[in-house]
Amino acid sequence: MINNEITEKAGFLADAIARSSELLELRRTEDAMSADESAQELIAELQKAQERFMEKQQSDSEPSETDKNAVDEIETKVEGNPVIVAYMTAQDNFTEMLDSVNAILAGAIAGTSDGCSCEDDTCDSGGCEPGGCGSRSCGCSGS
């Protein structure tokens, strides 16, 4: 049986993530990267170099120093492209936000939350964001 409270709150969480600045920035930078011809050429060039490198590894022949240098050179170009860097930064920020959400869920499931003790309804300041203990924000029952 599905718990309606859980699915309702999961819907609120999904909506909040969909409206998050992290996701909006990720989509904006992804669109910019897709529209940037030089960024697309660099990405395609990197993928081809990585494929050649992996093919040599899979065929039991050690990739040459030239192969390694080719991949490194293209990676350096990619890391120097501001449009790609902006996208990678936005992707890292979005992933970090999702990891934080996952850590909160894992903590609640494991019965631990940063600074929160539901047995005595106490926590250190900010430990049960948002709202602190007593607000049901980290599994505490509320007072």
Image (spheres, grey):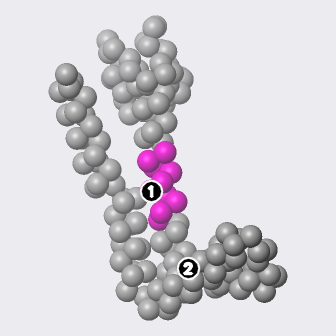
* Residue corresponding to mark 1: 94
Residue at the image point whose x is 24% and y is 48% from the top: 15
Placement of the C terminus among the 4 image quadrants: top left
Please, what secondary structure does the residue beneath circle 2 have?
helix
x, y percent for residue 19: 28, 55
What residue is drawn where x is 68% and y is 81%?
A: 71
Checking the image for residue 47, the label placed there is 2
Which region of the structure is painted magenta? 90-99
Q: Amino acid at mark 2?
A: Gln
Q: From this viewpoint, which residue is outermost toward the front?
A: 59
Residue under the point 38% across and 21% down: 139
Amino acid type at circle 1 is: Phe
Residue nearer the viewer, 62 or 127: 62
From the viewer's perspective, is 7 left or right of 61? left
Q: Badge 1: how crowded within 10 Å, few (<14), some, or many (20+)?
A: many
Q: Position of residue 87 (x, y in %)?
A: 48, 72
Q: Is residue 110 visible in this depiction of the protein?
A: yes
